[in-house]
Image (cartoon, rainbow, N blue to C red):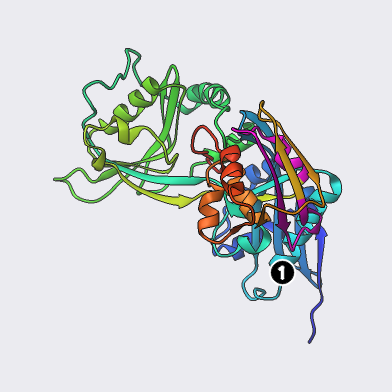
Amino acid sequence: MTSELSVRELTDDDFTENLAVLVSAFLKDPDPDREPLLRRVLELERHHGVFDGAEQVGSCGVMTRTLTVPGGEPRPLAAITHVGVKPGHRRRGIMRMMMRAQLHALHEAGAEPVAGLEASEAGIYGRYGYAPATEWADIRVPRGAEFRADVDTGPDPVREAPREDALPRLRELHDRAAGRVGWLDRGAPVWDLWLADTPRADRTAYRFATHPRGYAVYRLLHGEGRREARARVEVLEIQSLDAVAAAALWRYLLDIDLVSEVQWFGAAVDDPIRWFLADPRRARVEVEDALWLRIVDLDRALPARAYAAEADVVFQVSDRLCPWNAGRWRMAVDADGRAEVRRTDAEPALSLDISALAAAYLGGTTLTALAAAGLVSEHRRGSVRALTRAFLADRSPHCLIDF
């Protein structure tokens, strides 16, 4: 029997079947409590589904978000979510069909010039022009770890607050912190999904520690044993507007009784906790890729951010999936950090794939590092260094991926 694969945009009528595809793809059981939350955040009209005859076998969606880029401005981001292929239908080109349809639809509509996602498997998305543009740190600090004597935790106390009292404050502080590169906007439906709690015997519900200039959301994971402190503080999010608030929140979490350690998987790689500690080695840190970006429309994406240094470089771009990006481009950055990007017939000073530009877009990965890995080829000496300086950001980008 032959099968015929087709791809189309979804509608609200496809919600149930689309969710079934994803539950199957990610080897999960249905969760009826999450369905109302998903209905509020998913934009089915921005989803593509692949069908084998009448059966949906693949899903790939977009959420409408903004991403803070270098220069501190939020710019439109196509947040790619709910990407999956049913078991038994893999290795048939379904993922490529969806990725191509999605990217071409964004381009043809003149929609978001940049797309982003969290990669469940890191080996998949480079084939479609994505690259890791931010990193996470998995930080573990033992309870009671001592701070440097001069660390200022300020006079303001950290207080636990009930969920309903804490949420307005969290939303306000989150919006005030939005100038950090990598930041995503977060509307009410996303907040509800982000903080959705499923009760389990081995953990508490989320708890909310508030400070006038910051907050922490965490829960306690219970262990076994009565004679030793075996619970663990698992942090979902810490946000602070200054170093004093950050120190106060970390100190509060590290002083909770009856726990062994505080763990935050999702911290910024430059989180200040290591510099607060009297012995920085007490913080164990592992780094992992976080937000992957894809340049959809190069000529709109590159001028959307600010740059750290003047530059005038011609580069040759390859892009197999989005051919409108391929070719020679001249990027001229003025003294104010504004870029003009135009096609040119001039000889290129360097060559790179579109994925290399995506990796460097937020300033978290340098083009010199990519060149050292053979991902950027320099034809004119000094051109990689010049473009690297232009793309730099003041801090490591940080993105809490909540889609």
Quadrant in the picture for the C terminus: top right
Q: Residue at x 65, y 64 (%)?
A: 127
Disc 1, SS = helix
The answer to if 287 sits in the magenta stretch is: no
Does residue 145 appear left or right of residue 164 in this picture? left
Where is 36 relative to 150, above or below? Answer: below
Q: Is residue 323 magenta?
A: yes
Numbered label tally: 1
Provide the residue span drawn in magenta: 299-328
In this view, the residue in front, 303 or 377, is 377
Q: Which residue is depicted at the point 75% across and 66% down?
A: 97
Question: What amino acid does circle 1 point to?
Answer: Ile
Residue 59 spot, x, y in % from top left: 70, 60
Residue 2 seen in this snapshot: yes
Residue at the outermost left position: 227
Residue furthest to the bottom: 1
- Horizontal side of residue 198 vs 39, given as left or right: left
> Where is residue 257 shown, x and y percent of the image?
23, 33
Front residue of this view, candidates 329 and 21? 329
Residue in the picture at 13% in, 45% down: 227
Residue 299 higher or lower than 321, as above or below: above
Furthest toward the front, the residue is 381
Q: Nearer the viewer, residue 269 or 41?
A: 269
* Image x and y of residue 317, in percent: 72, 56
Q: Is residue 333 above or below residue 87?
A: above
Q: Which residue is mark 1?
A: 94
Q: Residue at x 56, y 45 (%)?
A: 385
